[in-house]
Image (spheres, grey):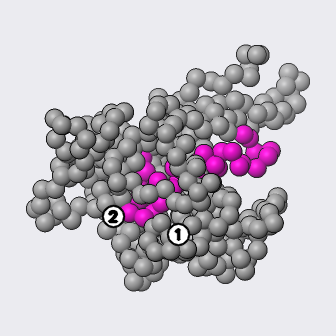
Amino acid sequence: MPQNSRPAPPTQLRIGLWGPPGSGKTTYLAALNVATTRRPDGVGSWIMSGLDDVSTSFLDRSTHQLTTQRTFPVATQQETNMLFRFTGEREVVRRSKIGRRLVEMEPIAFELDVLDVPGAMYDNPSREQGQEQHVNVPGPGGPPVADRQHAPPLSLMEQENRLIDHLQMCHGIVYLFDPERDSLEQDAFRYFHPVLNRLTERMMSQSHISRAKLPHHVAVCVTKFDQPNIHRHAQVKGYTVSDEQPPFLPRVPNEGAADFFKLLCSDPQSNSDLVEKGLRQHFNTLNYFITSSIGFYVPGNRFRLHDSMNVERVGPGHEGVRIKGRIYPINVLEPLLWLYESILPARP
């Protein structure tokens, strides 16, 4: 194999997932495998693989659930550390010996180190009420602590410290904002500000941090774009365009994503405007993505507005919600590629 066709040594990125319960953190991770495989031709191919048994098992199980069983992965109940490798290509522009502009595909690879924690960990009502709770967490590469005779469960405070430790060491953060949940529960800020306050306290107390804002690169992902009310809101306000290739899916281009996010956070019944402003005030490097882990229902490989919802209820509870057709993830891989491209030049 020619030397220039080999990927560079993988760059390990530690990425934190941040979002309230039900915002789709586990489904987002599960959809990444399908997103890499179903990526349109001509934009660079990618391969996602697990780097340990826990991560590979998660990919196997969650991909089977999304594509064959057409069910959603169960939300994370226990802290799980997973490590994935992404191997792919990026477009680079070079000059030939005679100065001609050449566009080439350069092989690259990076590793993604993710700590997936229950969404409830981003809340702190128990600490505020002076309660001491305990939760079971999996041991490194093994079964849950509850299954081991001599390992005590971690307290809520201990596991919260582990979460802040992880976010502190992250190069980047994927922040998931669920507009559907916030329109019903108005609790996005409730799960946002305790973590932001703790993380800011920790980072600013470090002697080597002298900048006014936190150093993390943050990909802000507005989730569940496939939901009719979210998609319709974006369409009515003029934010959507359609792909030029089948199945001609609608999407919000990145240049309009920040404005659409700000619009969604302007609900006077919610404090989500404090989320939008808090992100801008605390982080220097942000980018915005309007995403969907499962995408739209596209019978006949063509998007139809009147029949686009890709979920249906067939029974009660979580088990009663099924995915209707193929999943077409929208802007699921792209936040990670942006984080890679933006973090790499900034690293020492």
Q: Is mark 2 on a helix, strand or loop?
A: helix
Q: In which quarter of the image is the N terminus?
A: top right
Image coordinates of residue 81 in percent, x first then y, are 39, 40
**Which segment is the magenta one?**
16-45
Q: In this view, does 343 lie to the left or right of 108?
A: left
Mark 2, mark 1: which one is toward the viewer? 1
In the image, residue 32 lies in the stretch drawn in magenta: yes
Say which residue label 1 marks: 321
Q: Earlier in the sequence, mark 2 or mark 1?
A: 2
Image coordinates of residue 73 in percent, x first then y, are 49, 56
> Vertically, is 215 above or below 83?
below
Residue shown at 71% from the left, 48% from the top:
39
User: Real-space Cα distance between discs 2 and 1?
Assistant: 25 Å
In the image, residue 43 lies in the stretch drawn in magenta: yes
Q: How many marks?
A: 2
> Vertically, is 330 above or below 63?
below
Comparing 276 with 141, the one in front is 141
Q: What residue type is labelled 1?
A: Val
Decide if residue 56 is in sight here: yes
Q: Quadrant of residue 122?
A: bottom left
Say which residue label 2 marks: 191
> Vertically, is 288 above or below 270?
above
Binning the other alpha carbons within 10 Å of mark 2 as few (below 14), some (14 to 19) or many (20 upward) gives many
